[in-house]
Image: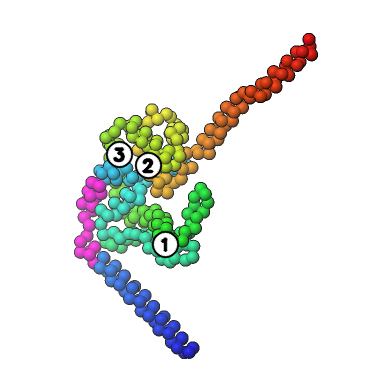
């Protein structure tokens, strides 16, 4: 019986080894095919740049193409995940994505990569994702495979963006960002005040950020906002939405709540208590009677 068990185990290991070898061989042939096609049909960098700039003229892309994040006391801009994907698609002969290398109890090991098949330039980042979601109510541990997949994909998106930007020439990226800013500045289908009101409402609904907190961030009232401020505000929203920065990086949430609390405390202290006033009146009356 033991001999049969050992023989079955050896056959199982042999089968698994053959399947793994076949899978690796298939992936190798696919890679060779991609490289061959890239060499047969090389990109024209001038046509690729033209396609990228044409895409950046679309308002729908320009609105989500750039994000801002704080660095010290300065505000730094950068291309978002959406713009990086458009750059990769129009640059051509570029393979990019996310692969889950291993799924362990409570965590996944994944790899984000971008590979220029023409120049053989490759960027990759290996990272670990805990199967947990942090909320205001506490930590939620994920068990559903769909939730785990979405969590890994969301965490991998920022790494893919970094890989793509490490492969595509920097001057192409800068030109695309400038073109998106031009598109946003010229998006005058609605008056600036209406567009600002829409953004103020969006910040309030999504992140509980008030107009006063936004005005405090910029240092002046919304009535003095310009087109550039509107673009910066949209970029801040994209930054928070994509997970590049947090609300606390931009707005003094705790300070704002403290001011509101102190304001209520002051109003409460200044509010007259009828019961105390009645007692004080009775005391004054008694003192007057004693004097008489």
Asked whether the viewer can see residue 152, the reply is: no
Which one is nearer the viewer's eye here, 211 or 85?
A: 211
* Alpha-carbon span between mark 2 and mark 1: 33 Å
Place of residue 284 in the rendered image (x, y in percent of width and height, measured from the top left): 72, 16
Query: Which SS class for mark 3?
Result: helix
Residue depicted at 30% across the width and 63% down the height: 120
Pointer 3 or 2: first along the chain: 3
Q: Nearer the viewer, residue 143 or 193?
A: 143
For mark 2, give the secondary structure.
Answer: helix
Q: Which residue is mark 2?
A: 235
In 3D space, how far apart are the residues under numbered discs 3 and 2 (Cα atoms)? 11 Å
Q: Is residue 52 above or below residue 233?
A: below
Instruction: From the image, give the main secondary structure of the stretch colored magenta.
Output: helix
Asked if the residue under mark 2 is in contact with the one under mark 3, i.e. CB atoms within 8 Å, the reply is no
**Closer to the eye: label 2 or 1:** 1
Q: Residue at x 59, y 30 (%)?
A: 265
Q: Which residue is mark 1?
A: 145
Residue 264 picture quarter: top right
Side of 280 where 87 appears, left or right: left
Q: Quadrant of the C terminus?
A: top right
For the residue carrying disc 3, how many other residues have a C-alpha within 10 Å: few (<14), some (14-19), or many (20+)?
Answer: many
Are dots 2 and 1 in contact, CB under 8 Å? Answer: no
**Could you give the CA–CA distance between mark 1 and mark 3, rounded to whole angstroms?**
39 Å
The residue drawn where x is 24% and y is 63% is 38
Whether residue 42 appears in magenta in the rendering, the answer is yes
- Residue holding disc 3: 184
Q: Residue 118 falls in which quadrant of the image? A: bottom left
* Residue 191 visible (yes or no): yes
Q: Which residues are magenta?
A: 36-55
């Amino acid at each position: 019986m033991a001999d049969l068990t050992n023989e079955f185990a050896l056959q199982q290991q042999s089968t698994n080894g053959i399947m793994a070898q076949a899978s690796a061989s298939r992936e190798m042939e696919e890679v060779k095919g991609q490289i061959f096609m890239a060499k047969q049909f090389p990109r024209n960098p001038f046509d690729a740049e033209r396609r990228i700039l044409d895409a950046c003229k679309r308002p729908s892309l320009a609105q989500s193409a750039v994000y801002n994040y704080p660095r010290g006391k300065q505000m730094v801009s950068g291309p978002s995940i959406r713009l990086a994907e458009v750059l990769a698609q129009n640059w051509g002969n570029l393979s990019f994505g996310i692969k889950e290398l291993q799924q362990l109890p409570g965590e996944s090991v994944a790899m984000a990569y971008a590979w220029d098949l023409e120049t053989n330039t490759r960027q990759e980042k290996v990272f670990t994702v805990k199967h947990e979601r942090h909320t205001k109510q506490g930590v939620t541990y994920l068990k559903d495979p769909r939730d785990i997949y979405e969590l890994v994909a969301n965490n991998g998106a920022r790494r893919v963006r970094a890989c793509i930007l490490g492969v595509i020439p920097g001057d192409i990226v800068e030109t695309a960002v400038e073109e998106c800013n031009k598109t946003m500045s010229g998006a005058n289908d609605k008056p600036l005040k209406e567009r600002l009101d829409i953004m103020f409402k969006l910040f309030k609904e999504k992140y509980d950020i008030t107009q006063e907190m936004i005005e405090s961030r910029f240092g002046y009232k919304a009535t003095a906002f310009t087109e550039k401020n509107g673009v910066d505000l949209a970029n801040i929203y994209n930054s928070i939405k994509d997970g590049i920065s947090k609300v606390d990086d931009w707005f003094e949430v705790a300070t704002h709540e403290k001011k509101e609390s102190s304001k209520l405390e002051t109003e409460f202290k200044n509010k007259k208590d009828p019961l105390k006033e009645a007692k004080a009146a009775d005391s004054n009356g008694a003192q007057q009677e004693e004097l008489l």
